[in-house]
Image (cartoon, grey):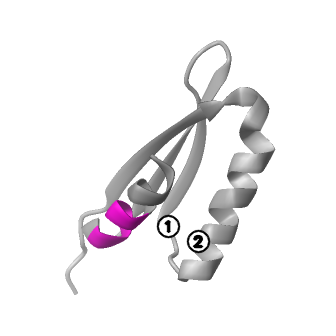
């Protein structure tokens, strides 16, 4: 069995938009049927938050990045 290298995408949003951003990403992931390997929320600054989302393939990561970057 060969393990593939995960591909990470970082998306930064205003902290006030956390709930809306999460809902938008969750809906997009469900509609595209993509499943991230990892989904982390991290503080990016005083008033912003970042999402670090990791996928198994570069193509999935690119799709996500194009939708949310």
Q: Name the secondary structure under disc 1.
A: loop
Considering every residue shown, the one lying at the far top of the view is 46
Magenta stretch: includes residue 60 = yes
State which region is magenta.
59-63
In the foreground, 39 or 60: 60
Q: Position of residue 54 (x, y in %)?
A: 42, 57
Relative height, residue 35 to residue 50 (above, below)? below
Q: Which mark is residue 29?
A: 2
Of the image marks 1 and 2, the number of the one nearer the N terminus? 2
Q: Position of residue 15 (x, y in %)?
A: 71, 28
Q: Identify the residue at image location x=58%, y=16%.
A: 45
Relative height, residue 45 to residue 17 (above, below)? above
Local packing at callout 1 (Cα closer than 10 Å; few below 14, some 14-19, many 20+) is: some
Q: Which mark is residue 14?
A: none
Q: Position of residue 10 (x, y in %)?
A: 44, 42
Give the label, 1 or 2, closer to the camera.
2
**The N terminus lies in quadrant:** bottom left
Local packing at callout 2 (Cα closer than 10 Å; few below 14, some 14-19, many 20+) is: some
């Amino acid at each position: 069995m060969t393990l593939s290298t995960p591909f990470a995408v970082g998306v930064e949003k205003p902290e006030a938009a956390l709930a809306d951003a999460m809902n938008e990403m969750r809906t997009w992931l469900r509609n595209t049927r993509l499943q991230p390997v990892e989904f982390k929320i991290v503080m990016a600054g005083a008033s912003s938050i970042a999402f670090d989302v990791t996928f198994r393939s570069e193509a999935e990561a690119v799709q996500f990045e194009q939708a949310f970057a």
